Structure formats: C-alpha cells, structure tokens
Amino acid sequence: MDIKLSCTANMVPGESLTEKAHLLRKMGYDGMAIFVDAPDWKDELLDEMLQMEEKTGVKPCEFVLTAGYYGHLMNKDPQIRAQALEAYKQSIAIANKIGAITEMEYEYRTQDPLPLFEPYKQMPPEEKELYLKIVNELGGCVVDGAYMLIESCNRYETKYLTRLCD
C-alpha cells in the first residue's frame, strides 16, 4: 500500500507556495491542498503550481477558490448561487490544468442557532432537481486528470447529504 501525505497550504509557514512546498517536502509530505481567496487569484499562482512538483517534489493535489460565496451553491439568492457556481467552475478549470482534485459543497456553514439540524432530513424534490442540475453542470467541466469531489458534510455543517445513500 502506497500512502501519500498532504497538507493544506494555509497551515504551513512561508511566503510563497513554493517555499511552503519545500518545507512540506522536508517534513515528508507528498502533496499540498491549495485554497485561494478568489479576489487574491493571480495567473502567477497557476505558473507556480504547474512547476511545484518538479521544483519541490510536492504535488498540488487539491485546488479551490474561496470567497464569501464558497459553499453556497444552493443559496436561495440566485445572485449568490451564480457567484458560487462561477467560482467552482474556475476552480475546476485550474484543477484541470494542474491535474488536481477540486471540491464542491452543497451547503457549507455552521448551524446557528442551535439546536443542530435533524441529520436525516431529506431534500425536497425541487431542491434535489436544482442540486442535480448544478452537479451535472460542474461535473461536465472536469476533464481527465482532474476530479471533483462532492464533499459529504457531517450533520454539524449541513442538514442534507449526511448519509451515504444521499
């Protein structure tokens, strides 16, 4: 069995992704998950990620653009939902170029107010239809060599998609 270790870039000290990758390699890591706030995205970061494995031995294994609309693919506000969809499409395009995984969250937030949601609530049919439309649209953007994870969330983060059968 071949086990690979990765770490999220924002948990590693360093001024650049390459500097962080060198440190990770020294610590025995093989990969780096990279989350970039969408307004901070620069094409230079893509060039750095494309050269990272060759320069450092650490592969960028996951990439996601984040922003205030991260995890809001099912938001009731169509404008926020559209912003989230566009950010996920950009993440997929970048993951396609670097051969990495990207992820999408159906609904990503802490539950407020408590008590926690009932973890076995089902999606209403109209919500399920919208969800499947979004998943199919995003899935159609992924090319060979990249992957999109539909991140299952636990009952503390969402009221849906908490069971394997979902």
Image (cartoon, helix red, strand yellow):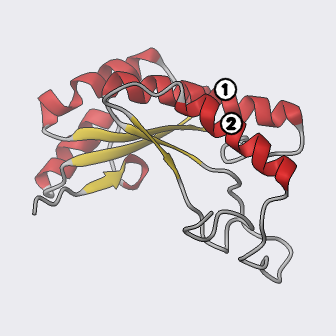
Q: Quadrant of the C terminus?
A: bottom right
> Rounded to the nearest whole Å, what is the CA distance between mark 1 and mark 2?
11 Å
Which label belongs to residue 125?
A: none
Q: Which quarter of the picture shows residue 96?
A: top left
How many C-alpha atoms fall within 10 Å of the one at disc 2: few (<14), some, or many (≥20)?
Answer: some
Which label belongs to residue 86?
A: 1
Q: Position of residue 128 (x, y in %)?
A: 76, 50
Q: Mark 2 points at which residue?
A: 134
Q: Nearer the viewer, residue 57 or 2?
A: 2
Image side of residue 143 versus residue 52, left or right: right
Secondary structure of the residue carrying numbered label 1:
helix
Q: Looking at the image, which residue is at 78% across and 36% down?
A: 81
Q: Looking at the image, which residue is at 71% across and 60% down?
A: 109
In this rendering, the answer to whether 93 lies above or below 133 is above
Image side of residue 25 versus residue 87, left or right: left
Image side of residue 132 versus residue 129, left or right: left
Look at discs 1 and 2 and give the one toward the viewer: 2
In this rendering, the answer to whether 120 lies above or below 138 is below
Q: In which quarter of the image is the N terminus?
A: bottom left
Q: Position of residue 102 (x, y in %)?
A: 46, 40
Image side of residue 80 versus residue 42, left or right: right
Q: Position of residue 161 (x, y in %)?
A: 65, 63
Note whether residue 67 is visible.
Answer: no
Secondary structure of the residue carrying numbered label 2:
helix
Q: Which quarter of the picture shows residue 38?
A: top right
